[in-house]
């Protein structure tokens, strides 16, 4: 029996879980990890926004770390603090930040899945600097006044410039996990607690 009977050369073992040339397989696994990020988002105690992030090393199909938005460990996430929007935003870690901190150096070459909000500008800088190679998340909407959309667009600008692939979550993928498309992109405006204080904000930030 000839050993050359395979029509396709055998892939090296290290490539077994990469999706090169297999977009359907990639879409299937993207959907699974989006679902996982959505599940993890529900662990957040934030009453207004529940965001989940999953870092995956695709080469080994390994979930490297997960994260959801919340206060640092041992900092009390009391209802009083969580309900005070301005205070909360000064204390909370984003889901992506928690996942990156948990992953440490293992974040390098991972794909990041984020569900619940668009990736913000700060998280984009951290994802880039951690060596993440691909980000799957809600697409911010251009042309809105929403804070999350505006910083989300800046985030994508930076990701693209840094050659980090950005893949927007599709409506179909959101439907598959029972997530309303608008809810998935719903955003609170972190600047609204500071209405009337814009001058100070502009000076200090
Ligand atoms: Zn963020």
Image (cartoon, helix red, strand yellow):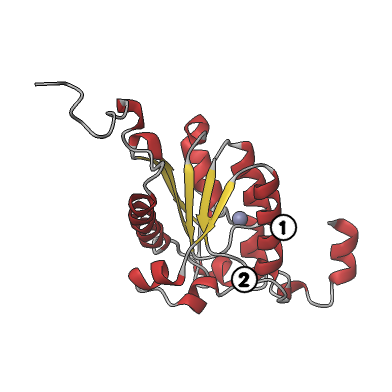
> In the rendered image of this protein, does residue 59 appear above or below residue 41?
above
**Residue that appears at 38% across and 38% down:** 18
SS category of the residue bearing label 2: loop
Q: Is mark 2 within 8 Å of ligand 1?
A: no
Residue behind mark 2: 84
From the viewer's side, name the closer residue of 80 and 18: 18
Q: Farthest residue toward the left?
A: 1
> In the rendered image of this protein, does residue 93 appear above or below residue 176?
above
Q: Which quadrant of the structure image shows residue 2?
A: top left
**Residue that appears at 58% across and 63% down:** 118
Point out residue 16 in the picture as x, y percentages from the top left corner: 31, 34
Point out residue 61 in the picture as x, y percentages from the top left corner: 33, 39
SS category of the residue bearing label 1: helix
**Residue that appears at 36% across and 47% down:** 22
* Residue 154: image tag: 1
Work out whether residue 70 can be spotted.
no
> In the rendered image of this protein, does residue 169 appear above or below residue 131?
below
Q: Which quadrant of the structure image shows residue 174?
A: bottom left
Q: Quadrant of ligand 1?
A: bottom right
Cα distance in 3D space between marks 2 and 1: 27 Å
Number of residues whose C-alpha sits closer than 10 Å to that of mark 1, classed few (under 14), some (14–19) or many (20 or more): some
């Amino acid at each position: 029996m000839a050993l050359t009977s395979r029509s396709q050369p055998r892939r090296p073992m290290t490539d077994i879980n990469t999706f090169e040339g297999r977009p359907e397989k990639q879409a299937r696994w993207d959907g699974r990890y989006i679902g996982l990020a959505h599940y993890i988002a529900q662990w957040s105690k934030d009453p207004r926004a529940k965001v989940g992030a999953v870092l995956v090393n695709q080469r080994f199909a390994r979930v490297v770390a997960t994260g959801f938005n919340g206060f640092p460990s041992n900092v009390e996430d009391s209802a009083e603090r969580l309900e005070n929007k301005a205070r909360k935003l000064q204390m909370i870690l984003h889901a992506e930040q928690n996942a990156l901190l948990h992953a440490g150096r293992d974040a390098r070459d991972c794909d990041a899945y984020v569900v619940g909000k668009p990736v913000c500008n700060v998280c984009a800088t951290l994802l880039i600097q951690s060596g993440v190679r691909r980000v799957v998340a809600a697409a911010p909407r251009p042309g809105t006044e929403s804070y999350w959309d505006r910083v989300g667009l800046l985030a994508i600008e930076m990701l693209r410039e840094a050659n980090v692939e950005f893949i927007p979550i599709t409506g179909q993928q959101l439907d598959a996990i029972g997530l309303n498309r608008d809810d998935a992109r719903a955003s609170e405006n972190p600047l609204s607690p500071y209405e009337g204080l814009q001058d100070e904000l502009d000076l200090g930030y």
